[in-house]
Image (cartoon, grey):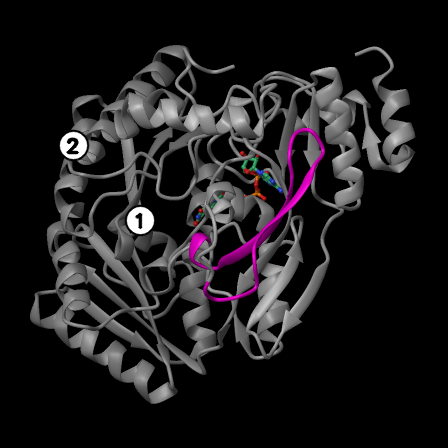
Amino acid sequence: MKGLAKDLAHLVGPEGFSTDPEDLLVYRHDAIAYFAQGEPAAVVLPKDTVHAAKVMAYASQNGIPLTPRGAGSGLSGGCTPVRGGIVLDTKRMKGILEINRGNLTARVEAGVVLAAFQQAVEAQGFFYPPDPQSKSVCTLGGNVATRAGGPRAVKYGTTVNYVLGLEAVLPDGEVIRTGSSCVKHSAGYDLTHLLTGSEGTLALITQATVRLLPKPPATCTALAVCPTMEMAARIVSETIAGGVVPSMLELLTTASLAVFNRFVTPPLPEEGEACLLMEFDGTAQEALRQAQEMAGACRDMGAIDVRVVPQADEAAVYWMVRSRLYPLVVSRFKRVVTEDVTVPRDRIPEFAAKVMGIAQEMGLSMGLTGHAGDGNMHPTIRMDEVTDALQARADQAMARVIKAGLALGGVISGEHGVGLHKAEFLELELGREQIALMRRIKKAFDPKGIMNPGKIWPPELAS
Ligand SMILES: Cc1cc2nc3c(=O)[nH]c(=O)nc-3n(C[C@H](O)[C@H](O)[C@H](O)COP(=O)(O)OP(=O)(O)OC[C@H]3O[C@@H](n4cnc5c(N)ncnc54)[C@H](O)[C@@H]3O)c2cc1C
């Protein structure tokens, strides 16, 4: 693009952008490196909203595609610049602007890393529950843009339940402030939650006002090894319906126990089909009582091994292993294809059976973990070698898995978003009418179609 570097230097200064091919290389893909697509002409690192607005107005005037990017930890290809143009990297916008004790809210810039934010609020006795397992790198802006969530969703919900207001830059450079810092707000359309989950296709989010909770004083972890997936899922449904709601509830296949056994003692029996890893919170007494109640229910229902881990440092080891499972699997195989299909909680056993059946029929190695408390499952195909034929088979298998989830009343994505990977399935979930309506909304925000083009929509509609 002729003159781009000169124009950007004028708008944001030499330290605010790069067109160096070596710098640009990393912006070709998100955390799924093999899915690299497209190459930006420049990356801009705005230092504030004013910088971002200037660049976006310039891009709009010149019809240049814009792709917002947080940490690039996404798993759906959402921040890859498939039509080239400018990547807007929020890395330099990492201010925690306010932690308001009286109002239990915080205001942050979009590029704040989630773990840093959680530490900052916890140091003041507060709690920000949304917990995507990429929290050591992912940004609050990326979390808002994808409606990210994690194990705590079962009790506390996901990012969408905490966003009260946003500052965002529209594609033409206009700055809007949506929502408020009030807990209740019922004036006008809810643009805050329209932008939440919009995956960078409507606007650049520059600031978020989020709700905080008081930090629960204690937690207690429990683990149950179950002979069948069906039993694990039944334990989940029945205990939650009975009023014991864990603050985290993860379903793992027994294959994961070998990884736990590298770190925990005594070793867990590597038997059965599934394992439940749970955390309860409240006062120390309450947390222990809930964990013990759950442990009793698991034993009564036939679990092979049940343990309660009240000590925080010992429990941290279990959760450290859980959060490292995906990176560990990725490091062990040549390629890993993972999805985030979500089904109603009571349909998990049927879904698990379908996934395993598809893997067997298609001769693929497939694992299944998930945030069982909310039905969000991660079927994961593990490839020892990479060939076009094997990738095509993996893609076919995942398409069948996604359709199996939909047939059980599920959704194509519980947390990663649509991005590129799931665009071809969007119509199956939403239908044509909703997609047509969403595209009219997109046109109202972005008449020139420069915001994150090529994403979300089914391929034949992608601009
Ligand atoms: C090991 C690992 C574990 C993970 N675990 C989870 C999990 O438990 N739960 C979960 O939900 N996700 C998980 N993810 C996926 C990912 O981390 C989340 O989707 C996260 O919210 C992405 O944040 P990010 O800052 O990296 O955004 P990016 O990947 O940079 O971008 C993601 C999308 O958001 C858009 N975007 C980013 N910033 C902005 C902004 N400021 N304004 C507008 N649009 C923007 C981008 O255009 C893109 O469409 C995991 C990923 C990895 C690698």
Identified by mark 1, the residue type is Gly
Examine the rendered structure and indicate whether residue 236 appears above or below residue 127. Answer: above
Front-lying residue, 281 or 101: 101
Residue 135 percent across, percent down from the top left:
54, 54
Judged left or right of residue 458, residue 202 is: right
Label 2: how many Cα within 10 Å (few below 14, some 14–19, many 20+): few
Judged left or right of residue 421, residue 396 is: left
Identified by mark 2, the residue type is Ala
Q: Is residue 174 covered in magenta?
A: yes
Residue under label 1, please give it: 370
- The answer to whether the residue bearing label 2 lies less than 8 angstroms from the nearest atom of ligand 1 is no
Residue 456 percent across, percent down from the top left:
45, 26
User: Does dot 1 land on a helix, a strand or a loop?
Assistant: strand
Choose top left, top right, bottom left or bottom right for residue 142: top right
Callouts 1 and 2 close, C-beta under 8 Å: no
Is residue 45 at least partly visible in the picture?
no
Q: Is residue 125 covered in magenta?
A: no
Residue under label 2, please give it: 407
Front-lying residue, 20 or 160: 160
Q: Which residues are magenta?
A: 160-184
Residue at left offset 75%, top offset 28% = 57
Q: State the residue lying farthest toward the bottom.
A: 285
